[in-house]
Amino acid sequence: MRLKQKIKTILLARKILDALPDPQIMKEKITSRKFWALIAGAAMVSFGDQLGLSPDTTQYVVQLVVAYIIGQGAVDAVSSLKSPAK
């Protein structure tokens, strides 16, 4: 009985490890400007009141962040279509 439980635990751990993203992909995402723009926008929403910003200013900055992320995503999509596959 204990052997079956150990095997189940090992198989479950393997499934969890297989579900984790590739470290290289995570490094690329964390170092991307879009990711940090997202973090800045989320911080603006979360801490705008504490920073003394009006709701209009917070909304304006968040709209700029969203526009930047969408625009940069479009540029990245076009450039990936133009470049040959690795």
Image (tube, helix red, strand yellow):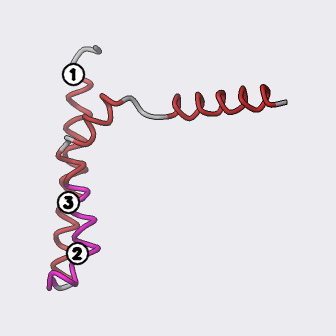
Which residue is the site of mark 1? 82
Q: Nearer the viewer, residue 14 or 5?
A: 5
Q: Disc 2 on helix, strand or loop?
A: helix
Left or right of 21? Residue 79 is left
Q: Which mark is residue 65?
A: 3
Q: Quadrant of the C terminus?
A: top left
Q: Amino acid at mark 3?
A: Val
Front disc: 1 or 2: 2
CA–CA distance in space, label 3 to label 2 = 10 Å
Q: Position of residue 5 (x, y in %)?
A: 76, 32
- x 65%, y 33%: residue: 12
Left or right of 42? Residue 18 is right
Q: Nearer the viewer, residue 11 or 20?
A: 11
Front disc: 1 or 3: 3
Q: Magenta residues?
A: 37-53
- x 25%, y 43%: residue: 30
Q: Position of residue 61 (x, y in %)?
A: 16, 69
Q: Nearer the viewer, residue 83 or 19?
A: 19
Q: Amino acid at mark 1?
A: Lys
First in residue order: circle 3 vs circle 2: 2
> Would you say the residues marked 3 and 2 are in contact, meaning their CB atoms lie under 8 Å apart?
no
CA–CA distance in space, label 1 to label 3 = 26 Å
Q: Disc 1 on helix, strand or loop?
A: helix
Which residue is the site of mark 2? 59
